[in-house]
């Protein structure tokens, strides 16, 4: 995951080209392309993964290829999206003087050379794979 290096703390993050959403301190804020993931319970999914061996492998068909994603119990939305080639995940640690109560912000952008159609397809298929795996884990199927 790349570090987001910028020095403009006045411009709203949502106004940057290709912005899709962010994750900070347990809260996920999503723009339209990521909305299908906003209601997914990553916390419970992580607990289920932990109860079933600690990791899951998902196959996500994107265009003419299949992307393999490994999900660990503590990954959450950040770890999952970081493996999807249509999304670029950047970490923003902010300025060093924010104090001890501050934490990183993970910012999601559309990846370079990806169009909106491919992005939507990949997110929709990821959401379906996550929901299906979640249901399997809840039913006790490993």
Image: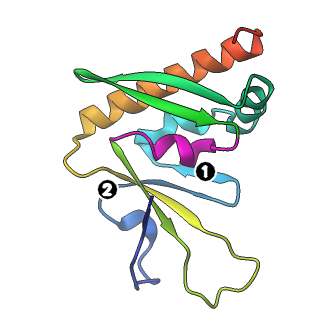
Count how many numbered circles sit on residues in the image: 2
Gap in Å between the C-alphas at discs 1 and 2? 17 Å
Point out residue 109 in the picture as x, y percentages from the top left corner.
37, 54
Tag 2's secondary structure? Answer: loop
State the residue position of label 1: 28
Residue beneath the point at 47% across and 83% down: 9
Measured along the vertical axis of the image, is residue 3 above or below residue 133?
A: below
Point out residue 135 in the picture as x, y percentages from the top left corner.
68, 14
Earlier in the chain: of badge 1 and badge 2, it is 2
Residue beneath the point at 55% across and 49% down: 78
State the residue position of label 2: 18
Residue beneath the point at 60% across and 68% down: 104
Pointer 2: residues within 10 angstroms few (<14), some, or many (20+)?
Answer: some
Point out residue 122 in the picture as x, y percentages from the top left corner.
36, 30
Q: Quadrant of the N terminus?
A: bottom left
Measured along the vertical axis of the image, is residue 2 above or below residue 99?
A: above
Horizontally, is 2 left or right of 48 in the view? left
Residue 94 part of the magenta-drawn span: no
Pointer 1: residues within 10 angstroms few (<14), some, or many (20+)?
Answer: some
Residue 44 falls in which quadrant of the image?
Answer: top right
Magenta stretch, residue numbers: 74-85
Instruction: Name the one closer to the observer, 61 or 32.
Output: 61
Name the mark on residue 6. none
Tag 1's secondary structure? Answer: strand
Instruction: Name the one closer to the observer, 118 or 141.
Output: 141
Point out residue 65 in the picture as x, y percentages from the top left corner.
27, 23
Name of the residue lying farthest toward the left: 113
């Amino acid at each position: 995951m790349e570090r987001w290096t910028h020095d403009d703390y006045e411009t709203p993050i949502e106004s940057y080209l290709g912005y899709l959403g962010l994750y900070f301190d347990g809260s996920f804020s999503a723009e339209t392309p990521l909305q299908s993931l906003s209601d997914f319970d990553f916390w419970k999914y992580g607990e289920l993964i932990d109860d079933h061996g600690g990791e899951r492998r998902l196959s996500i068909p994107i265009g003419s290829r299949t992307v393999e994603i490994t999900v660990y119990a503590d990954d959450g939305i950040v770890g999952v999206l970081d493996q999807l080639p249509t999304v670029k995940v950047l970490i923003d640690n902010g300025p060093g003087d924010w104090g001890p109560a501050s934490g990183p912000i993970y910012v999601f952008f559309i990846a370079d050379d990806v169009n909106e159609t491919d992005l939507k397809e990949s997110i929709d298929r990821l959401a379906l794979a996550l929901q299906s795996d979640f249901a399997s884990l809840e039913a006790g199927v490993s």
